[in-house]
Image (cartoon, rainbow, N blue to C red):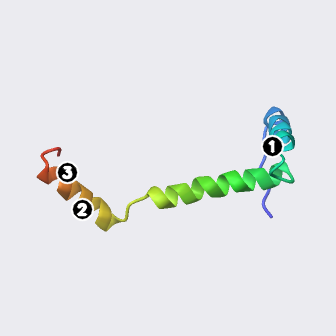
Amino acid sequence: MPTVNIRDDLYSRLEEYVRRVGAFNSVEEFVNFVLEELISEEKESALSPEEEEKVKERLRALGYI
């Protein structure tokens, strides 16, 4: 498994957060969860090229572009 470096002060804050929240067993579990959420949100919000073209056509028809 690859390793990611995190500043000591940030890691300490993450440890405190994980302890306080109690929903995660470790900082690693929390970080993996957050990163997965960010990536899945990006995929969900991205338009396909066809969808993007339809939006542009609609904006042109409405006079916005």
Tell me which numbered mark, 3 or 1, is placed earlier along the sequence.
1
Q: Is residue 27 above or below residue 39?
A: above
Q: CA distance from mark 2 to mark 1?
A: 43 Å
The residue that disc 1 covers is 21
Q: Amino acid at mark 3?
A: Leu
Tell me which numbered mark, 2 or 1, is placed earlier along the sequence.
1
Relative depth, front residue between 25 and 42: 25
Quarter of the figure with residue 17: top right
Relative depth, front residue between 64 and 20: 20
Q: If the image is split into quadrants, where does the N terminus sit?
A: bottom right
Relative depth, front residue between 56 and 23: 23
The residue that disc 3 covers is 59
Q: CA distance from mark 2 to mark 3?
A: 9 Å
The residue that disc 2 covers is 54
Q: Residue at x 57, y 60 (%)?
A: 40
Q: Amino acid at mark 2?
A: Lys
In the displayed structure image, the side of residue 12 where residue 53 appears, left or right:
left
Q: Which mark is residue 35?
A: none
Is label 2 in contact with label 1 (beta carbons under 8 Å)? no
Q: Amino acid at mark 1?
A: Val
Numbered disc in front, either 3 or 1:
1
In the displayed structure image, the side of residue 44 where residue 59 appears, left or right:
left
In the displayed structure image, the side of residue 54 where residue 61 appears, left or right:
left
Q: Is residue 14 above or below residue 35?
A: above
Q: Helix or strand or loop: what does disc 2 sit on?
A: helix
Q: Helix or strand or loop: what does disc 3 sit on?
A: helix
Tell me which numbered mark, 2 or 3, is placed earlier along the sequence.
2
Q: Looking at the picture, how far across and down is residue 10, in whole percent?
A: 78, 35
Q: Residue at x 62, y 55 (%)?
A: 37
Q: CA distance from mark 3 to mark 1?
A: 44 Å
